[in-house]
Amino acid sequence: MIKLKMGERFAALRNREIASLERRLFLRQGLSMGALSLLAGCNVTDEAGVENALRKISSWNDTVQAKLFAPKRLAQEYPASAIVRPFPFNAFYDEDGIPAVSAADFSLELAGLIRERKPWRLADLYALPQVTQTTRHICVEGWSAVGQWSGTPLRHFLERVGADTSARYVGFKCADDYYTSIDMATALHPQTLMAFRQDGDILPAPNGFPLKIRVPTKLGFKNPKHVRAIFVTNEYPGGYWEDQGYNWFAGL
Amino acid sequence: MSDSRTEHLPASPMIHGRLVRLAHWVNALAFLVLLLSGWKIYNASPVFAFRLPGELTLGGWLGGALLWHFAAMWLLALNGLLYLGYGFLSGHFRRKLWPVSPAAVWADIRAALSGRLAHDDLSVYNAAQRAAYIALILGIALLALSGLAIWKPVQLAPLVELFGGFDTARIVHFVAMALTLVVVAVHVLMVALVPRTLLTMLIGRLPATRSPQ
């Protein structure tokens, strides 16, 4: 189902998406000044200027968070009794929009600064060494839920395929057209997993079959589901929500 | 203009220094932005069984509210640290907010409610004011700490533990907001009742013509 040439196609798509999203969503949803402008008794006309300033501060917050991030500090692990069942479904679409990924047809594509870019079949991914961890998934909305995920440390996979781990970003493209990216330090964190299983079972469709990147040191929207491509790059890749204004680093 | 007119008159005593006034208004702005953007963030996934009035919130949507919230936090933190540093080191807190005894606070609240609380000397805070301003400082400090716990629950895990977990830290953050807001509301009400206090927080002193001593 995925026969895209990766690499330069990514870049083109990404830039177009970012440009159009930025215009559309910010004009529509806006950063309504709401009650503040009422209280101030005036309309803030320079909304673009305000938004620009806020985005600059958000970039500054990325820098601060990267400094705060301790590469070896582990997110708290919980006992099995803390696991929330059923695990909440959350996406930018309703449950009827969950992509039907065929296990037989699936292949994970690799692109960018990676030496061995041959696609990976699901059976080969399942054969990788796996670990299990029970951690808290924290949504940007504020709710949280403890879940258990099993899979291969992303670090192990990146080293195995010869990724340039001195590059700045690791990006993800998903079967539901979601996309996001994380900093290399977080990609190499011991708890950052390529999760194939949740709660002992093969990852269910609502929770990201067949592959979810589980990042317990970042907010939920940095944990992409239905991942079909991984790329390594030095060019800021953004993300579905990040391009609309969510903070990019989003570290916990 | 009024400055040049009153310049030749004997200066009335300074009630609020420049740094205190600046810190007050920067804090008021940061607090307002954090409050209204925080309400929008709360509404994205309410801790309690109610939502806050959406038309009063700031940011337009969750992403916008978060941008405001995590920008204004710097303003609140830097301004707050400057103010606390000044307050402790210069003796400002010791002079203006201390001592404060529960009995004196209670007596002043009763006097205020019966309209008998004197406001002759604005340079001296009564016991109810002292208690309120200390409560406000503590409330904002609690907001900052619980906010840090929610923002960085992995990097600042011991802080989260101190609050009894991530979900409890969210509740603490909300309750601290509500209590702080009550103090702010009473404060604003008192300023409305004694409007010349607003003037002193703006220009530092009462105009010379109104202060014959």
Image: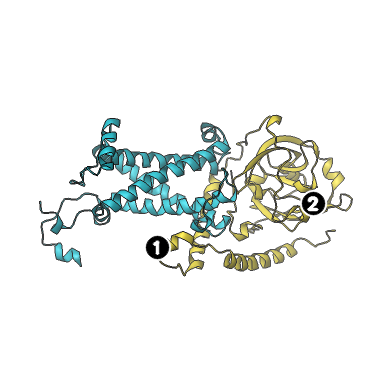
Chain colours: A yellow, B cyan
State if disc 2 and disc 1 touch (CB < 8 Å): no
Mark 1 Cα shell of 10 Å, populated few (<14), some (14-19), many (≥20):
few
User: What amino acid does circle 1 point to?
Assistant: Ala
Residue A143 location in percent, x, y? Answer: 62, 44
Q: Is residue A107 shown above or below A3?
A: above
Q: Which mark is residue B48?
A: none
Furthest residue toward front: B114
Furthest residue toward bottom: A45
Mark 2 Cα shell of 10 Å, populated few (<14), some (14-19), many (≥20):
few
* Of A201 and B103, the residue lying toward us: B103
Number of numbered labels in the structure image: 2
Chain bearing mark 2: A
Report whether residue A22 is seen.
Answer: yes
Q: Which residue is at 54% across, 60% downward?
A: B60
User: What amino acid does circle 2 point to?
Assistant: Glu
Q: Which residue is at 29% across, 34% downward?
A: B106
Identify residue for label 1: A40
Furthest residue toward right: A104
Identify residue for label 2: A116
Left/right placement of residue A108 relative to residue B134 reads right
Q: Is residue B103 shown above or below A52?
A: above
* Secondary structure at numbered mark 1: helix
Residue B72 location in percent, x, y? Answer: 45, 53
Residue B20 location in percent, x, y? Answer: 29, 49
* Of B86 and B22, the residue lying toward us: B22
Q: Quadrant of residue B62?
A: bottom right
Q: Which residue is at 64% across, 59% downward?
A: A235
* Secondary structure at numbered mark 2: loop
Dot in front, 1 or 2? 1
